[in-house]
Image (cartoon, rainbow, N blue to C red):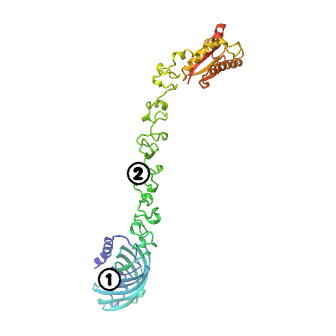
């Protein structure tokens, strides 16, 4: 019997845990029935029957029994119990006793756990054995805890202090028990009556569905309506409940490329080449490019896409399909023998022979001494220059005036500039466009020879023609 008493509590715990399926809350109302088992302490202080008339005492013993109860509210219940107390007297003679009782308990709950305290009363009867027969009333106070293991069963631990006139000298008797309650009928809190317990219901006052943890979900996408940006259209959590066909986290209504996953910075469109231009706007989506060319590459930065550029690594104008032509004469630099002076194709980019005769220092252009007035004898030379300029109308010239070192520097600079302007005015007066000619004076700053004698000074007093772009 002692072995049975010692192993019974462990067996009950194991049974309860073994049947645990999921945690539910303590019922508000219901009926339950279940076994319990435990121990009585200090039975030797009992005076059941005529035991104490002699020298015999009662050994501590166990108890096994059955409880029947009803829960009126989650915090209030009534318990009826009947138990068998097998024990022995000090002479090893067996004693059989029966306990019955009725009690009320007050319970505080938190989810699946209820902690309670209560009290009650009943009878303890010695049926036969060393004590003979006797019946004593008893009262008790108790505390305990019940833990719901499934929606129909709980494990219950109870400790009660028993008061009875069968105790000598107001001695105490403790009964410790462990049991199971099986709920034949139960009700739990479901305020919104949606079939989901308030304990598990994220929206306990509003009817909802299990897939949204008890909250409303009109579109059935598993996202509760109060967190769903599109509560009437099924969507995904990553897009706050709105449709997102390509699953890139951008709602379809805001996604320029709703069927192709992309980035938020491009309004849901991809950028395959990583050039910062979304594929939908990129004419070269597989090659990093520049915005000015709609995403196409331009290695030389000349504004012409590499695919359209005959010289993709050398900057050039569009009229030469991206190849360089520094002098703008239509002859590409690679083919131009004179890449810095406008020329003609027939001369491989150089000036025609007739024009070359009128570049550099022009002999025969003379001025009045200390003046910008052109001498008449110079008109023949100038008229030939006019004829050549009219024949080759693409040629542009810079007319440069130079002096010797005689006289003040400032005066020489002004004189050289005035003489260059005089030549320009003469040529434009003969019908050559003014925008093809530029006059500039250099004074004595660019001598051709040292100003040490008359011959050298005469060389330094000159007009030069230089072809320009």
Q: Position of residue 168 (x, y in %)?
A: 40, 88
Q: Position of residue 102 (x, y in %)?
A: 39, 86
Q: Position of residue 45 (x, y in %)?
A: 37, 85
Quarter location, residue 167: bottom left
Q: Nearer the viewer, mark 1 or mark 2?
A: 2
Q: Is residue 251 visible?
A: no
Of residues 68 and 228, the one nearer the viewer is 228
Task: Say left or right for 229 vs 180.
Answer: right
Q: Secondary structure at mark 1?
A: strand
Q: Residues within 10 Å of mark 2 (few under 14, many from 20)?
A: some
Q: Is residue 81 visible?
A: yes
Quarter location, residue 295: top left
Q: Position of residue 325 (x, y in %)?
A: 49, 26
Task: Say left or right for 305 vs 88.
Answer: right
Of residues 450 and 281, the one nearer the viewer is 281
Q: Quadrant of the C terminus?
A: top right
Q: Earlier in the sequence, mark 1 or mark 2?
A: 1
Checking the image for residue 261, the label placed there is 2
Asked if residue 202 is positioned above or below residue 285 in the image, the reply reads below
On the image, numbered disc 1 is attached to which residue? 65
For the residues labelled 1 and 2, say whether their Cβ atoms are less than 8 Å apart: no
Quarter location, residue 42: bottom left
Of residues 10 and 50, the one nearer the viewer is 10
**Number of callouts in the render?**
2
Asked if residue 118 is positioned above or below residue 233 in the image, the reply reads below
Picture residue at 43% right of the left edge, 45% below the top: 279
Cα distance between the residues tagged 1 and 2: 68 Å
Of residues 401 and 301, the one nearer the viewer is 401
Q: Residue furthest front?
A: 431
Q: Secondary structure at mark 2?
A: loop
């Amino acid at each position: 019997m002692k072995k049975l008493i010692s192993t019974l509590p462990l067996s009950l715990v194991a049974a309860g845990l073994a049947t645990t399926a999921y945690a539910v809350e303590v019922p508000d109302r219901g009926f339950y029935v279940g076994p319990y088992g435990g121990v009585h302490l200090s039975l030797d202080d009992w005076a059941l029957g005529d035991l104490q008339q002699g020298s015999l005492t009662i050994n501590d013993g166990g108890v096994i029994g059955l409880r029947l109860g009803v829960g009126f509210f989650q915090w209030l219940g009534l318990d009826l119990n009947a138990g068998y107390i097998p024990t022995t007297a000090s002479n090893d003679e067996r004693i059989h006793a029966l306990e019955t009782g009725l009690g009320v308990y007050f319970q505080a709950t938190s989810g699946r756990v209820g902690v309670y305290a209560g009290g009650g009363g009943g009878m303890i009867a010695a049926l036969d054995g060393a004590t003979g027969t006797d019946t004593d009333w008893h009262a008790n106070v108790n505390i305990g805890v019940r833990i719901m293991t499934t929606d129909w069963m709980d494990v219950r631990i109870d400790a009660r202090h028993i008061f009875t006139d069968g105790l000598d000298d107001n001695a105490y008797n403790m009964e410790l028990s462990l049991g199971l309650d099986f709920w034949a009928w139960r009700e739990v809190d479901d305020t919104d009556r949606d079939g989901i317990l308030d304990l598990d219901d994220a929206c306990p006052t509003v009817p909802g569905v299990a897939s949204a943890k008890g909250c409303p979900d009109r579109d059935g996408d598993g996202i509760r309506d109060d967190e769903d940006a599109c509560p009437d259209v099924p969507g995904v959590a990553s897009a706050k409940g709105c449709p997102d066909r390509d699953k890139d986290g951008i709602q379809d209504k805001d996604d320029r490329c709703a069927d192709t996953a992309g980035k938020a910075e491009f309004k849901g469109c991809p950028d395959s080449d990583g050039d910062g231009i979304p594929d939908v706007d990129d004419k070269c989506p597989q090659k990093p490019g520049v915005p000015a060319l709609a995403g196409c590459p331009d290695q030389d930065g000349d504004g012409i896409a590499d695919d359209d550029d005959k010289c993709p690594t050398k900057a050039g104008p569009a009229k030469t399909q991206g190849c360089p032509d520094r002098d703008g004469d239509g002859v590409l630099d690679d083919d131009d023998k004179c890449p810095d002076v406008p020329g003609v194709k027939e001369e491989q980019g150089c000036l025609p022979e007739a024009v070359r005769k009128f570049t550099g220092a022009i002999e025969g252009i003379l001025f009045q001494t200390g003046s910008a007035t052109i001498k008449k004898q110079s008109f023949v030379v100038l008229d030939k220059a006019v004829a050549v300029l009219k024949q080759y109308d693409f040629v542009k010239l810079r007319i440069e005036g130079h002096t010797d070192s005689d006289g003040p520097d400032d005066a020489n600079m002004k004189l050289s500039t005035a003489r260059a302007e005089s030549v320009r005015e003469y040529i434009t007066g003969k019908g050559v466009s003014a925008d093809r000619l530029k006059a500039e004076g250099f004074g004595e700053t660019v001598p051709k020879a040292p100003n040490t004698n008359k011959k050298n000074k005469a060389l330094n007093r000159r007009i030069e023609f230089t072809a320009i772009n």
